[in-house]
Amino acid sequence: MTKYYLQIFTLFMVIVSCGNDDGPGYQEPYDPTDDDPVVIDPLPENELLDLVQERTFKYFWDYAESNSGAARERYHPNDPGNDQNTVTSGGSGFGLMAILVGIERGYITRAEGVERLTQILNFFETADRFHGAWSHWINGTNGNVLPFSSLDDGGDIVETAFLVQGLICVKEYFKTGSEEEINLANQADALWKGVEWDWYTQEQNALYWHWSPNHNFAINLELVGYNETLIACILGAASPDHPISAEVYHQGWANNGAIVSSETDYGIPLVLDHVGSGTGPLFWAHYSYLGLDPRNLSDQYANYWALNTNHSLINYEHCVDNPGNYAEYGPDCWGLTASYSRNTDGSVGYNAHDPENDTGVISPTAAVSSIPYTPEESLAAMQYFYANDLLGPAGFYDAFSPQFNNWVTERYLAIDQGPQIIMIENYRTGLLWDLFMQNEDVQNGLNILGFSY
């Protein structure tokens, strides 16, 4: 795990763990001897997918930050005031895409969607920006930056990329609509084109994650793959006004070709080196691909459909193999990624779960969001999550562990809920993939970097 990931996960664990031994969001261990187990029949596939998508949509609609309409960093049903005005820029990008799904699925009307999206875009238009990039966290009441850490109080180019992915989908969805919708599309287009991707290179053949007006590039974290940051490189190359060069991608992110891996796990090729983390948490197969369509995506380094399918299958095979002998791990109980977690003392923390860091905690977003890559395995997991009463008011709860007497954290994070509703939709209709990939600037960026798609 890279130094930056260690810093970020340490910060998250401090934020989410303090005072939580018996605090809000912590569920007392379930005693299976209290009652006879209730058997829940499996749902037909479409009914299950409808239920999960509609329930997960509520995170971005019913439980959004009230002033901005954007996505809250977290939502705790048992403590709804927790960080209620903390907006997450990346999660809000996922939220923009979720609202488009809500319109298509009939959860809201098109007019309701336009009204909420206009509210959100107006907020980001006036929020603090740092050479065009937004901060990781933003105060939803006034648009001011909320520091993510002592040095991270400015622009975050990766969170910004996740937001831009959603802005481009909004632009494409409404660009031929009514006058109001065309205005919304143009606003989304202008917002993303204001990002100064070239500033975040420090005039080198690399992209750097953060810039602060108080600390400059003090964090000095270069984007080197393979991880969740591919989308930032592609959008940087796609920018018509502030582009990065192809060398930033090839020499920086792809590490002059050293990103390619010949390693295997469970006999499955990794394809690329999952930087600093063995096979890596499964969100790496999700965040960049909510709009970016991996089905026919390849470059000189990888076939990205094979990469993500293999990543998902390795995660699955690890849980089936279950080297840690954790309770109930198997073909229908699997999925390791970054999420809330159970600390050793039973309190709630945060951890980047993966096969090399398996603590017996399953994160539903891992299996659910991999449904395009592993449909049978993901659907089996969803049936298990549903049958075990893990579906709460805003979708599946963020994490659980049968190993620890059916421990569940009744909490949600935007970055975990968003990929579920979006990737289910991409599996069903390809909606967000089609919208994002039809954008001419995106196509230009892919061409510059040498992608086939």
Image (cartoon, grey):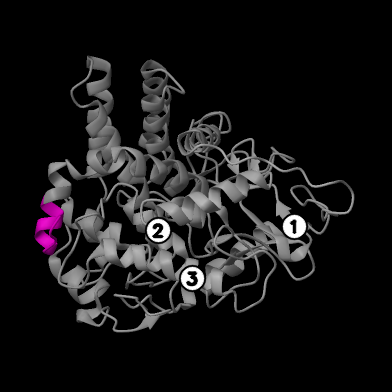
Chief secondary structure of the magenta portion? helix
Q: Pointer 2: residues within 10 angstroms few (<14), some, or many (20+)?
A: few
Q: Secondary structure at mark 2?
A: loop
Which of labels 3 and 2 is toward the front?
3
Disc 1 from disc 3: Cα separation? 23 Å
Element on which disc 3 rests: helix
Q: Residue at x 43, y 75 (%)?
A: 279
Residue 213 - label = 2
Q: Assess disc 1: are there few (<14), some (14-19) or many (≥20) residues with their C-alpha within 10 Å of its C-alpha.
A: many
As measured in the structure, the alpha-carbon distance from the residue carrying label 3 to the one carrying label 2 is 45 Å
Q: Amino acid at mark 1?
A: Trp
Left or right: where does residue 406 sit relative to residue 148? Answer: right
Lower position in the chain sequence, tag 3 or tag 2 = 2
Q: Is residue 252 above or below residue 340?
A: below
Residue 407, labelled with which disc? 1
Q: Position of residue 200 (x, y in %)?
A: 28, 62
Residue located at (59% from left, 73% from top): 358
Q: Amino acid at mark 2?
A: Pro
- Res 425 → quadrant: top left
Which residue appears at 67% of the width and 75% of the height? Answer: 325
Residue 446 image offset from top left, x and y in percent = 15, 56
In whole angstroms, how far apart are the C-alphas of marks 2 and 1? Answer: 43 Å
Mark with earlier residue (2, 1):
2
Reading the chain from its start, which is encountered first: label 1 or label 3? 3
Which region is colored magenta?
444-453
Give the residue at x 43% y 25%.
116
| Residue 448 on the magenta span | yes
- Helix, strand or loop at label 1? It is strand
Q: Is residue 190 visible?
A: yes
Report the side of 347 relative to 264 (left or right).
right
Per the rendering, the mark at residue 317 is 3
Of residues 250 and 273, the one drawn nearer to the viewer in this rendering: 273
